Amino acid sequence: TQLLEQSPQFLSIQEGENLTVYCNSSSVFSSLQWYRQEPGEGPVLLVTVVTGGEVKKLKRLTFQFGDARKDSSLHITAAQPGDTGLYLCAVPGAGNMLTFGGGTRLMVKP
Amino acid sequence: EPEVTQTPSHQVTQMGQEVILRCVPISNHLYFYWYRQILGQKVEFLVSFYNNEISEKSEIFDDQFSVERPDGSNFTLKIRSTKLEDSAMYFCASSEGRGGLYEQYFGPGTRLTVT
């Protein structure tokens, strides 16, 4: 059983469209982080959500932490080709270790 | 903006050889980590390090692996006798302090190819 399930695994959309990707679990977490990773590079931290129901915005990206702190979503408005990448959610555990989901690979076509 | 740096960017080695991957964490950070990502797979935790000792390690981090902070700036991962299955991207990360938001900042990675 995967600790974090991300869906969809792959998403290909046209520039200007909106999209939502999900990170789900049956476990409750103290916090959850979203990262973006481009090919051949390390994950780049986008946001940390802490409080159940919390919503954070980063330009065209909106992150929400579920009320029960078991899941999270990332919504992108008016996607651009520069948004292309692998979006990862991650949760902390013992020794500050992060457990990552499998990611959603997003491609935005011009 | 401070960043984590890693060297080399790409390392090719023969099976059975020792490799050392190097990282310079962000200067005021206290926690250091190694992760790996096999091509097409998830980012996997290897080890966390604080106050000159290992805090946590995964099942992957067996006796072939070791970490060291040889001076005030470098953090290294050594693989004593590499195997084909060690081929992966290895990422170093660092975070500021205990507890809080566990926000980790990753380096660009070292691509290790074992032949």
Image: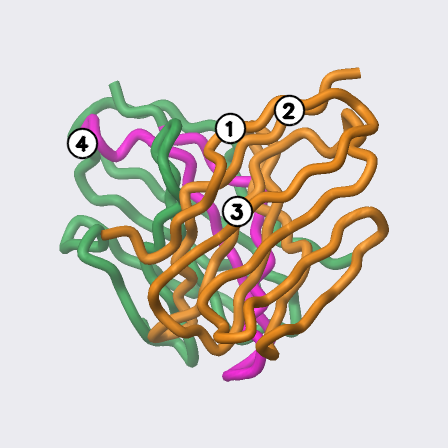
Q: Which residues are magenta?
A: B83-112
Amino acid residing under circle 3: Leu
Q: Position of residue A8 (x, y in %)?
A: 49, 36
Q: CA distance from mark 4 to mark 2?
A: 34 Å
Amino acid residing under circle 1: Phe
Q: CA distance from mark 3 to mark 4?
A: 28 Å
Q: Is residue A17 left or right of residue B64?
A: right
Q: Are marks 2 and 1 in contact (CB under 8 Å)?
A: yes
Numbered tag placed on residue A10 in the rendering = 1
Question: Magenta stretch containing residue B92, yes or no?
Answer: yes
Write down the residue under mark 2.
A107
Q: Quadrant of the N terminus of chain B?
A: bottom right
Tag 2 subunit: A
Tell me the mark number nearer the camera, choosing from 3 and 4: 3
Is the residue A54 above or below the residue A7 in the image? below
Write down the residue under mark 3.
A88
Write down the residue under mark 4.
B83
Q: Position of residue B81 (x, y in %)?
A: 17, 38
Q: Is residue B108 left or right of residue B110?
A: right
The residue carrying pointer 3 sits among few (fewer than 14), some (14 to 19) or many (20 or more) residues within 10 Å by Cα, namely many
Q: Nearer the viewer, residue A18 or A98?
A: A18
Q: Nearer the viewer, residue A29 or A99?
A: A29
Colour in which chain A is drawn: orange
Q: Residue at x 41, y 28 (%)?
A: B11
